[in-house]
Image (cartoon, rainbow, N blue to C red):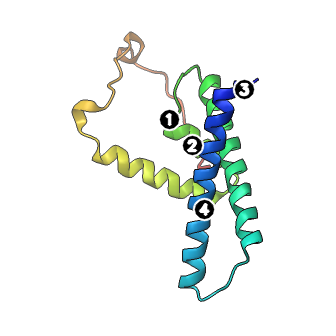
């Protein structure tokens, strides 16, 4: 159960999200020389907030399932798996971020003793998502 403080913060976040969504919808309508009723804009704002809320819950579950306490880019890409274009865009964005990251800040994997031993020949096939 949410505490009163949590409910208050959720309501504040919902209101701010709704105002931002309305502002974006109105700006896009103006750019495209369209009129959008306030009822439709409010409905879109509410749906977008509910979607974002569910996305946050999904991301939290993905991170927990992987044994992590924080969400990473792979969780976000996994959440977008139903929309191939979005998932591809997110992968590209993630790769760009990794490329911009200074080498010293990247996590380095320790070489395991197993890697020093010669491996039996095996074939690995990479299947794109």
Q: Secondary structure at mark 1?
A: loop
Q: CA distance from mark 2 to mark 3?
A: 25 Å
Mark 4 Cα shell of 10 Å, populated few (<14), some (14-19), many (≥20):
some
**Relative to 13, does residue 108 appear above or below in the rendering?**
above
Q: What's the residue at 76%, 63% (across, down)?
A: 43
Which is nearer the eye, 73 or 7? 7
Q: Position of residue 84 (x, y in %)?
A: 64, 58
Residues tagged 3 and 4 counted as in contact (Cβ below 8 A) = no
Q: Earlier in the sequence, mark 3 or mark 4?
A: 3
Residues tagged 2 and 1 counted as in contact (Cβ below 8 A) = yes
Q: What's the residue at 54%, 75% (across, down)?
A: 27
Mark 2 Cα shell of 10 Å, populated few (<14), some (14-19), many (≥20):
many
Q: CA distance from mark 2 to mark 1?
A: 7 Å
Report which residue position mark 3 lands on. 2
Q: Secondary structure at mark 3?
A: loop
Q: Earlier in the sequence, mark 1 or mark 3?
A: 3
Report which residue position mark 2 lands on. 76
Report which residue position mark 1 lands on. 72
Q: Nearer the viewer, mark 1 or mark 3?
A: 3
> Is residue 5 visible from the viewing direction of this image?
yes
Q: What's the residue at 60%, 44% (across, down)?
A: 13
Quadrant hosting residue 118:
top left
Q: Earlier in the sequence, mark 2 or mark 3?
A: 3
């Amino acid at each position: 159960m949410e505490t009163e403080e949590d409910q208050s913060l959720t309501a504040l976040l919902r209101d701010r999200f709704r105002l931002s969504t309305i502002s974006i919808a109105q700006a896009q309508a103006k750019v495209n020389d369209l009129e959008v009723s306030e009822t439709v804009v409010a409905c879109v704002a509410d749906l977008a907030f509910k979607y974002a809320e569910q996305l946050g819950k999904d991301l939290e579950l993905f991170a927990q399932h992987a044994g992590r306490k924080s969400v990473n880019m792979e969780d976000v890409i996994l959440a977008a798996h139903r929309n191939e274009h979005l998932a591809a865009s997110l992968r590209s964005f993630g790769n760009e971020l990794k490329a911009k990251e200074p080498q010293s800040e990247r996590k380095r994997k320790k070489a395991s003793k197993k890697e020093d031993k010669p491996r039996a020949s095996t074939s690995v096939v990479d299947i794109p998502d």
